[in-house]
């Protein structure tokens, strides 16, 4: 187990290094000049050239790369070209909103998605199953921004129940923090609920048709015991895999939801940085995202051993 | 446990109740209160040094935390701001300025003449007018803690106007130790002497920026007039919320979560007009010109006839309709100095024809010897208005047989490609659309878009020595009438040479809650003093 963990951690570093190199080269080869964006729309050629010189953007690419790698190894992710602040500080500011939104979304999605999936599998072919299938189809097909605008109009503008936009750190109180996350969580979790429900239903249906389930029924096991003690445990591995992938994707991919609800998270930071060609931030975010993606997958792999004792590393 | 439809319904009901709890807790009053204002600005404040960059958002930041030696009043006349008294010697070569009493930095130290001298020198490295002052200056130095002089080699009639110029980068006075940095090196502190203090602790670049009232600021006694007069701050705090999505920003304005939205999209104007709590207001009444730049170094626009063809081809009304659908906020423009500026005029504008003149354009392209060369139009797809106009331009050119091709990219990509002087086959370009403030266009010393000095000119690199000879004498014109006369001569040359083509002019209304009043309407800068907010 320890050897496996070490192997995975080493591979995580290798993945991050490859991502870093790829991102560095891609950014430098893509068109766009941060100096021109900084200088402003009507800036003169001299102003832009001066800024380029000061930012070190005129240096040969290998020198820029070596300096960047050296700084990274020393724990320095660089300084934002625009904000003039350390990338790690900016990432730190943006991590809490994204993690809050991701964790709340996963809690809601897993609770509702798994419940709906179990219920649909238990009553497969019935009215509830069909209703849940329709819900899943809607959840898949309606874009998150459409859901977002709809619930903003309904819950924030018409009913005045919840704020339209923004984020309050949890340090300012759990109430305001939760209040600002309700609508984005609702919008974001709809698709995930549908996805997890479909996977759960399919996985449960497979298990429910096994011989040992018929044996359990013949022995007089209650529906609760059959579904949760016997079926769900055996159907858990694919569900856990999907949940893990969804969570990893959420951390790095909630751009639209963060934009619609103005949540100042990692997604917004990334899009702004790409638009502005703020290279240090883009590099920092992508390395962080790749690291988290690999670590979440590792956590999922380890969690398999908890629900399926046959799996050993 | 029995899983029944009834149980499921009960669980759903309970979940709904939990989700509705915030409504019980949430007061429906304004989230910001009457002593604080929340604004959604046109863009995100990313650079904090208003000399290092010429962006308007950083100029607004500068106007909040820094002060200026002179300010323009509502008639665009310069008035003393930090300066108490000033005079000029009889030979018009030595200007002496004395700072008024009560000026201090946010850290409590007094503002001195040395700060002003260092600030002028730094600004003089980047602002075209400032560069002229530095080039003409024999000496810029302090006489004592409150007095400094600018001694010139030869008179400069526009000196005070240049010091008060609103075209970014504006002359904001910084502490000497900050201003001693080169203009290409960003100042890292945010300590000014202006009416607002930057709240470092609450600054979250990309999310929100907070300014607090500077209680120790001593305003001038004169009433507020444009940017001149007393800068009276009526609120305790102003927060700039960054809301990237315009629809969300509008929803936040409707829900009273913000008080001001600087760039409501044209398709949401009707929504503002139908809401009794909201209002549209044009602050910059001069507005902006939409300008088509052509690459004068490469075919086909290295030939003046081809540029004249485009001048005759453009249907300004159609262009503006494609860019800004509400006719209330757009108009045509025929003066190179913009619409309604002090030097706008109608010299040599016979080319203007409602609907454009495609036949004439076709003829001129023929006279230019146009042989089907590719015309590459840089198309910034993330600037929707320009994207629309670029597509219309391409279609209009194709209609008269020009081989026009769009090169879509984001604005960042465009800024790289527009710097290339090579032919289009080697990654160069033929045309792109930009915009410039009419206020800046009224001063050919302030905007690089009115240069015609070849390689040193702005993108497109027009070159006309006769025009340039007039432009360089602009600063020596002592009176407005003299400048008006020069403007007519310069325009006559420009429209024959066709240094650029205008697509129209527009003003952009801001949207605000009606509880927010007292906004000062000036070009380039949205000042935050004087505004008032009534409760609920």
Image (tube, coloured by chain):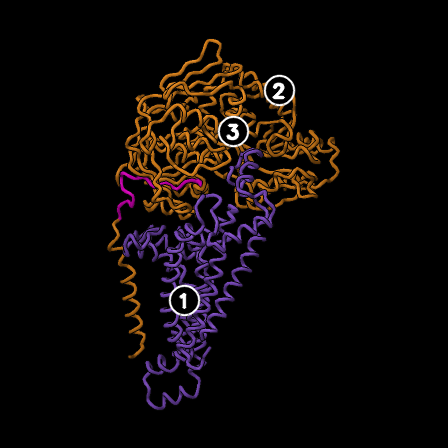
Chain colours: A purple, B orange
x and y, in percent, of residue B143 in the image: 40, 18
Q: Give the residue at mark 3.
A: B125
Question: Total number of numbered labels?
Answer: 3
Quarter of the view holding residue B335: top right
Looking at the rendered image, the disc whose residue lies closer to the viewer, 3 or 1, is: 3
User: Residue drawn at (29%, 52%), measured in percent from left and top?
Assistant: A172
Does the magenta portion include A251? Answer: no
The residue where tag 1 is placed is A193
Chain letter behind tag 2: B
Give the image location of residue B344, x and y in percent: 53, 22
Farthest residue, direction top: B90
Magenta segment main secondary structure: loop
Element at badge 1?
Answer: helix
Element marked by disc 3: loop
* Local crowd size for mark 1, using a 10 Å CA cut-off: few (<14), some (14–19), many (≥20): many
What residue is disc 2 on? Answer: B469
Chain bearing tag 3 is B
Magenta span includes B40 = yes
Residue A216 shows up from this direction: yes
Parent chain of label 1: A
In-image side of B110 versus B424 (left or right): left
Dots 2, 3 in contact, CB < 8 A: no
2 vs 3, front mark: 3
Which quadrant is home to the C terminus of chain B?
Answer: top left
């Amino acid at each position: 187990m320890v050897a496996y963990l070490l192997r995975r951690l080493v591979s995580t570093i290798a993945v991050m290094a490859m991502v870093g190199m790829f991102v560095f080269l891609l950014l430098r080869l893509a068109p766009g000049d941060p100096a021109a964006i900084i200088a402003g729309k009507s800036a003169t050629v001299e102003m832009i050239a001066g800024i380029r010189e000061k930012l070190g953007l005129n240096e040969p690419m290998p020198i820029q790369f070596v300096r960047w790698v050296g700084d990274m190894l020393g724990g320095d992710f660089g300084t934002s070209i625009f904000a003039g602040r350390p990338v790690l500080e900016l990432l730190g500011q943006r991590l809490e909103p994204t993690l809050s939104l991701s964790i709340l979304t996963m809690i809601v999605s897993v609770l509702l998605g798994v419940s709906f999936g179990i219920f649909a599998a238990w009553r497969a072919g019935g009215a509830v199953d069909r209703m849940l299938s329709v819900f899943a189809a809607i959840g898949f097909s309606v874009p998150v921004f459409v859901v977002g605008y709809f619930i903003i109009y309904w819950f924030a503008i018409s009913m005045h129940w919840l704020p339209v936009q923004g984020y309050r750190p949890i340090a300012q109180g759990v109430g305001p923090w939760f209040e600002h996350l309700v609508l984005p969580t609702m919008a974001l979790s709809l698709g995930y609920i549908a996805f997890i429900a479909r996977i759960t239903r399919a996985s449960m249906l497979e298990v429910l048709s096994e011989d040992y389930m018929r044996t359990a029924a013949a022995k007089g096991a209650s529906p609760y015991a059959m579904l949760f003690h016997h079926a769900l445990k055996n159907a858990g591995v694919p569900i856990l895999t999907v949940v893990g992938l969804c969570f990893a994707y959420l951390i790095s991919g909630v751009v639209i939801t963060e934009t619609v609800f103005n949540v100042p998270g990692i997604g917004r930071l990334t899009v702004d940085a790409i638009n502005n060609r703020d290279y240090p931030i883009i590099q920092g975010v992508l390395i962080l995202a790749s690291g988290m993606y690999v670590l979440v997958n590792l956590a999922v792999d380890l969690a398999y051993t908890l629900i399926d004792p046959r799996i050993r590393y | 446990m029995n899983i029944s439809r009834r149980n499921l319904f009960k669980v759903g009901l309970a979940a709904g109740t939990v989700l509705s709890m915030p409504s019980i807790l949430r007061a429906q009053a304004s989230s910001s209160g009457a002593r604080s204002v929340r604004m959604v600005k046109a863009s995100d404040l990313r650079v904090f040094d208003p000399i290092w960059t010429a962006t308007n958002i950083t100029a607004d930041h500068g106007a909040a935390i820094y002060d200026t030696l002179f300010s323009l009043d509502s008639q665009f006349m310069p008035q003393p701001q930090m300066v108490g008294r000033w005079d000029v010697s009889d030979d018009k070569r030595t200007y002496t300025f004395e700072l008024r009493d009560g000026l201090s930095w946010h850290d409590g130290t007094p503002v001195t003449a040395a700060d002003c001298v260092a600030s002028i020198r730094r600004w003089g490295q980047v602002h075209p007018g400032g560069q002229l002052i530095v080039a003409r200056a024999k000496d810029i130095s302090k006489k004592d803690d409150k007095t400094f002089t600018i001694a010139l080699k030869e008179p400069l009639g526009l000196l005070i106007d240049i010091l008060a110029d609103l075209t970014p980068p504006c002359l904001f006075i910084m502490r000497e130790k900050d201003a001693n940095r080169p203009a290409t090196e960003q100042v890292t502190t945010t300590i000014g002497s202006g009416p607002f203090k930057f709240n470092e602790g609450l600054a979250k670049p990309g999310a929100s920026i907070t300014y607090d009232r500077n209680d120790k600021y001593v305003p001038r006694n004169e009433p507020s007039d444009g940017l001149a007069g007393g800068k009276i701050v009526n609120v305790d705090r102003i927060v700039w919320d960054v809301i990237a999505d315009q629809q969300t920003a509008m929803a936040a304005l409707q829900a009273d979560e913000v008080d001001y939205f600087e760039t409501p999209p044209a398709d949401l104007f009707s929504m503002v007009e139908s809401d009794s709590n909201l209002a549209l207001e044009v602050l910059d009444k001069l507005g902006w010109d939409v300008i088509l730049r052509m690459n004068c170094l490469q075919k086909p626009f290295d030939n003046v006839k081809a540029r004249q063809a485009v001048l005759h081809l453009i249907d300004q009304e159609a262009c503006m309709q494609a860019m800004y659908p509400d006719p209330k906020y757009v108009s045509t423009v025929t003066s190179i100095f913009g619409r309604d500026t002090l030097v706008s005029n109608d010299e040599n504008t016979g080319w203007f024809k409602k609907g454009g003149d495609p036949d004439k354009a076709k003829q001129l392209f023929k006279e230019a010897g146009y042989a089907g060369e590719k015309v590459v139009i840089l198309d910034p797809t993330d600037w929707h208005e320009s994207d629309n106009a670029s597509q219309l331009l391409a279609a209009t050119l194709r209609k008269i047989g020009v081989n026009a091709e769009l090169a879509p990219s984001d604005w960042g990509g465009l800024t790289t490609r527009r710097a290339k002087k090579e032919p289009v086959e080697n990654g160069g370009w033929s045309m792109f659309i930009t915009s410039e403030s009419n206020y800046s266009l009224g001063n050919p010393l302030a905007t690089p878009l009115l240069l015609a000095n070849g390689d040193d000119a702005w993108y497109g690199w027009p070159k006309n020595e006769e025009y340039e000879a007039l432009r360089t004498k602009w600063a020596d014109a002592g009176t407005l009438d003299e400048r008006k006369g020069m403007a007519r001569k310069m325009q006559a040359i420009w429209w024959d040479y066709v240094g650029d083509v205008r697509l129209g002019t527009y003003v952009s209304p801001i949207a605000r809650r009606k509880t927010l009043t007292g906004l000062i309407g000036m070009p380039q800068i949205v000042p935050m003093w004087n505004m008032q907010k009534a409760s609920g």
